[in-house]
């Protein structure tokens, strides 16, 4: 019978193993990360990281169409890369590819069990697709007490969508998008003030 050989323990592993234990790197998410990367060859992981970095460069410049193939390559090589999936979903949403965006946001929520960003944009995606009841269901998953302005707007829009006289979904999307834009401006202004 053949036994799997364990990789030899390096000095680095020996020295840093105790530090990891003290820092809590043996916490529950550490096995989840190990499980997520299991089966991903080191070369594929490197290529996925490079594609993610290229995607982030396009994403930062609001070049969403250019970011899409990079993020797709990343998740092809590393399917459990949830941040790449979220960004891919956002880029697909921004370019009007709502069915594909919905797929990515739903997968992130399914894998992560909860994700405010994905719930927010999944609701917007459904609203853009003309499915108000699905938008409400997605927004019910958004629970971010740090973002009172956004939660207040979502609650208002959900109430309107559940009322007998339904609002125009285009108006709903515009109102939520405007609230997100205003909140981003607030955060950027606060960051600029903090820096001096």
Image (tube, rainbow, N blue to C red):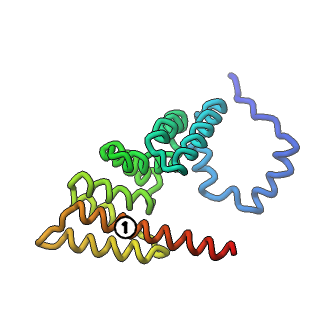
Q: Is residue 92 above or below residue 73?
A: below
Whether residue 160 sits left or right of residue 177 in the image: it is left
Pointer 1: what residue? 178
Whether residue 12 sits left or right of residue 187 in the image: it is right
Where is residue 144 shown, x and y percent of the image? 45, 71
Q: Quadrant of the C terminus?
A: bottom right
At horizontal 54% and vertical 33% (from top left) the residue drawn is: 77
Q: Residue furthest left?
A: 164
Q: Secondary structure at mark 1?
A: helix
Near mark 1 (Cα within 10 A), the count class, few <14, some 14-19 or many ≥20, is some
The answer to which of 9 and 66 lies nearer the viewer is 66
Q: Residue furthest top?
A: 1
The answer to which of 34 and 146 lies nearer the viewer is 146
Q: Quadrant of residue 45?
A: top right
Where is residue 8 shown, x and y percent of the image? 82, 35
At horizontal 46% and vertical 50% (from top left) the residue drawn is: 86
The answer to which of 185 and 2 lies nearer the viewer is 185
Where is residue 32 shown, x and y percent of the image? 57, 50
The answer to which of 41 and 98 lies nearer the viewer is 98
Whether residue 133 sits left or right of residue 108 in the image: it is left
Q: Quadrant of the N terminus?
A: top right
How many marks overall? 1
Q: Is residue 70 above or below residue 24?
A: above
At horizontal 61% and vertical 71% (from top left) the residue drawn is: 191
Q: Quadrant of residue 44?
A: top right
Where is residue 12 shown, x and y percent of the image? 85, 45
């Amino acid at each position: 019978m053949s036994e799997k050989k364990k990789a030899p323990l390096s000095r680095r592993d020996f020295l840093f193993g105790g530090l990891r234990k003290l820092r809590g790197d043996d916490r529950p998410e550490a096995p989840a990360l190990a499980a997520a990367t299991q089966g991903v060859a080191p070369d594929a992981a490197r290529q996925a990281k490079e594609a993610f970095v290229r995607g982030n460069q396009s994403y930062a410049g609001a070049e969403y169409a250019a970011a899409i193939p990079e993020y797709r390559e990343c998740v092809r090589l590393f399917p459990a890369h949830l941040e790449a999936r979220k960004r891919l979903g956002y880029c697909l949403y921004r370019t009007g590819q709502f069915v594909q965006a919905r797929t990515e946001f739903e997968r992130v929520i399914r894998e992560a069990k909860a994700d405010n960003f994905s719930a927010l944009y999944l609701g917007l995606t459904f609203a853009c697709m003309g499915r108000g009841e699905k938008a409400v269901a997605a927004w019910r998953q958004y629970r971010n007490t740090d973002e009172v302005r956004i939660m207040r707007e979502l609650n208002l829009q959900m109430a309107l969508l559940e009322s007998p006289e339904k609002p125009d979904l285009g108006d709903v999307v515009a109102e939520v998008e405007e609230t997100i834009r205003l909140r981003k401006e607030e955060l950027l202004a606060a960051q600029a003030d903090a820096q001096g």
